[in-house]
Amino acid sequence: MYMKMFQMVSHFFASCLSLFTGGQECLCCGKLSSWSPLCPECQREKLFIWTPKSQRCCCCGKELVSEIGICTLCRNQQLLTHTKQVLPIHSYRLWKKDLLFAWKTAGMRQLSPVLAQLMASFLKSEWGDLKEVPLVPVPPRKGKIRQRGWDQVQELCQYLKNYHGFQVLPLLERQSLEQQKKLDRQGRLDNLGKSYSLSKKFSKKLAEKKLTLPKKVILIDDILTTGVTLETCARALQEAGVEEVYGCTLFYVT
């Protein structure tokens, strides 16, 4: 409840400040927007339009070009073996790079409700049969929230829970302190299976209340790069007893 009130107040003041200073340019079309760095027209006509699941790889979820069913990379060397299916929403290019940078790095948290609305709409549209399945956020590295004051994936999931009715379970914790974005592809692959594990705090809670893990979950992250993060998280969840793990991210690197 207090977190929800804090989000509402902080975003209200961010909106007022933006309007007071005359607004800001839309990251997509360059026209003057109001409180958001993405104007309503671009949100409606570009952000909330995506490639349907039927035209994506059945493994990694990336858009198919000339392939049928599964992309060439997954056919030759499938990395995501512990996930039932992964579906990223948009490719990480052009104005969408600026959008993720503005939200994740520059800290424009007024984008959080917009991106949560995007993911909620996508999940309900493309995975209608999974809309009751709990969401599991990919956890931040230790010390990140203390250092920066927030984590973008955690906040995204808070909006999905508080405003869109999804169940969110923080089942995982991160072991590694190293930032994935600073690693090359081989460095990320070397971390496969090492960086994430089942949360000790949540495991204790399950034991105390004699609860069991859900049979299905959907992992939530901001971007799919090599797939190592989702694969490591999915492996940890399956080893703990989750039967089916799906994945959804806002963006994917082509």
Image (cartoon, rainbow, N blue to C red):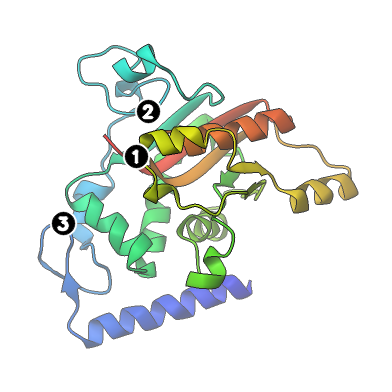
**Is 65 drawn above or below residue 233 in the view shown?**
above
Residue 215 x, y percent position in the rendering = 69, 30
Looking at the image, is 121 positioned above or below residue 231?
below
Q: Residue at x 27, y 32 (%)?
A: 51
Residue that label 2 marks: 61
Closer to the camera in the image, 205 or 130: 205
Going from N to C along the chain, the mark reached first, 3 or 2, is: 3
Q: Residue 203: where, in percent of width, then height?
A: 79, 46
Amino acid type of the residue that numbered disc 2 sits on in the rendered structure: Gly
Q: Are marks 3 and 1 in contact (CB under 8 Å)?
A: no
Q: Nearer the viewer, residue 217 or 201?
A: 201
State the residue position of label 3.
28
Task: Residue 28 in the image: state x and y as whole percent.
Answer: 16, 56
Residue type (three-letter) at the residue carrying disc 3 = Cys
Quarter assignment of residue 109: bottom left
Which residue ends up furthest to the bottom in the rendered image? 20
